[in-house]
């Protein structure tokens, strides 16, 4: 089940997918419980560029309803938003009853990227860190279940992932000038992280740090941890009795559209492939 590579253990893809399937079933059970009980859940993911936040969130949400599990990834603030109270743009996205809201980066941008890149002053950061424990206490007192995760990777792994974004056409959109600059400022980010965790890790809203150097184990560990942090029960699944279909009086199927998408990968493609094989066989016989 688990392969050992050097000093670390790496889970196989087969074992990963099997465990992920089980955890997805539990997340669906959690979703039903959240709706049944009207729970309000807020999950924050922070970490360096390339830490695996997006992949982890995708693993959590790919089998649940997007109307219950909502992902929030806010863009760069507009000029109007820059003039607002800092937390103002985040508050509207907080969960209502029966919702799980996942922040792919959150208000902690102020203690991380904004501070390191000089988008805010040191005084702004100091004020932010001083009020965060009280803000989060207010959220929890209002009934929100707040979970905060920091995904931790080492320097070599970050470099490997960022370079992979250049080489892989599916990932090239992920690489931005900000990523390159964050790569250069590794030590600045480390200091900002340490000060953020020290100031905002409280008994009522602790930080949970996950080793994400291996993406598969990080995703599984985080999902299991989330499930352990939110007490839930498996609700009985209602039995479904399918009714008889209404009979078609005409006795033939209706064609919904005449503009069909070409079946490029279906029967026509298979026939062309067979023709190619037959032609190849004939050539061999001729030789």
Image: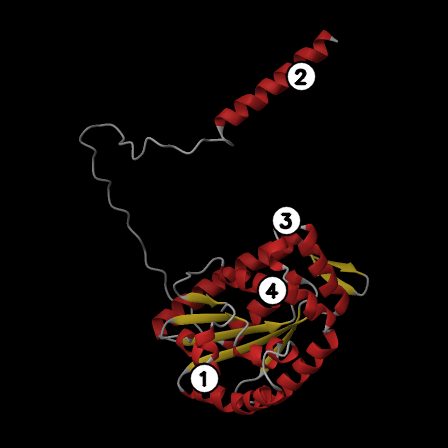
Residue 264 in percent (x, y) is at: 50, 31
Quarter location, residue 118 = bottom right
Foreground pick, 109 / 78: 78
Separation of residues labelled 4 and 1 (CA atoms): 34 Å
Q: Which quadrant of the view contains residue 245? A: top left
Q: Crowding at label 1, few (<14), some or many (≥20) Cα neighbours within 10 Å?
A: few
Q: Nearer the viewer, residue 27 or 280?
A: 280
Secondary element under disc 3, as helix, strand or loop, is loop
Q: Which residue is mark 2?
A: 280
Sequence-wise first label, 2 or 3: 3
What label sits on residue 169 in the rendered view?
A: 3
Residues 210 and 130: in front is 130
Q: Earlier in the sequence, mark 1 or mark 3?
A: 1
Task: Give the alpha-carbon distance from disc 2 to disc 1, as whole Å.
Answer: 71 Å
* Secondary structure state at the residue bearing disc 4: helix
Closer to the observer: label 4 or label 1?
A: 1
Contact (Cβ within 8 Å) of mark 4 with mark 2: no
Question: Image point 65% across, 64% down: which residue?
Answer: 177
| Separation (CA) of disc 3 from disc 4 | 23 Å
Q: Earlier in the sequence, mark 4 or mark 2?
A: 4
């Amino acid at each position: 089940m688990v392969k050992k590579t050097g000093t670390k253990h790496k889970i196989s893809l087969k074992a990963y997918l099997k465990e992920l399937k089980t955890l997805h079933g539990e997340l669906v059970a959690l979703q039903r419980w959240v709706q049944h009980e009207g729970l309000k859940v807020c999950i924050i993911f922070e970490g360096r560029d390339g830490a695996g936040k997006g992949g982890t969130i995708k693993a959590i949400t790919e089998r649940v309803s997007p109307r219950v599990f909502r992902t929030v990834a806010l863009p760069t603030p507009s000029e109007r938003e820059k003039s607002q109270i800092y937390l103002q743009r985040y508050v509207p996205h907080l969960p209502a009853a029966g919702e799980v809201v996942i922040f792919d980066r959150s208000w902690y941008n102020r203690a991380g990227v904004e501070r390191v890149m000089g988008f805010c002053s040191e005084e702004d950061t100091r004020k932010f860190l001083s009020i965060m424990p009280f803000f989060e206490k207010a959220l929890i007192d209002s009934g929100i279940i707040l979970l905060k995760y920091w995904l931790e990777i080492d320097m070599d792994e970050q470099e490997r992932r960022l370079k992979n974004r250049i080489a892989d056409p599916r990932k090239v959109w992920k690489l931005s000038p900000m990523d390159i600059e964050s790569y250069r400022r590794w030590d600045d980010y480390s200091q900002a992280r340490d000060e953020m965790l020290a100031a905002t890790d409280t008994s009522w809203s602790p930080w949970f740090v996950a080793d994400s150097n291996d993406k598969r184990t990080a995703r599984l560990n985080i999902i299991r941890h989330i499930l352990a942090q939110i007490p839930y029960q498996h609700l009985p699944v209602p039995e479904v009795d399918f009714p008889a279909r209404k009979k078609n009086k005409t006795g033939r199927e209706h064609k919904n559209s005449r503009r069909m998408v070409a079946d490029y990968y279906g029967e026509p493609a298979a026939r062309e492939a067979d023709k190619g094989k037959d032609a190849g066989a004939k050539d061999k016989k001729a030789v």
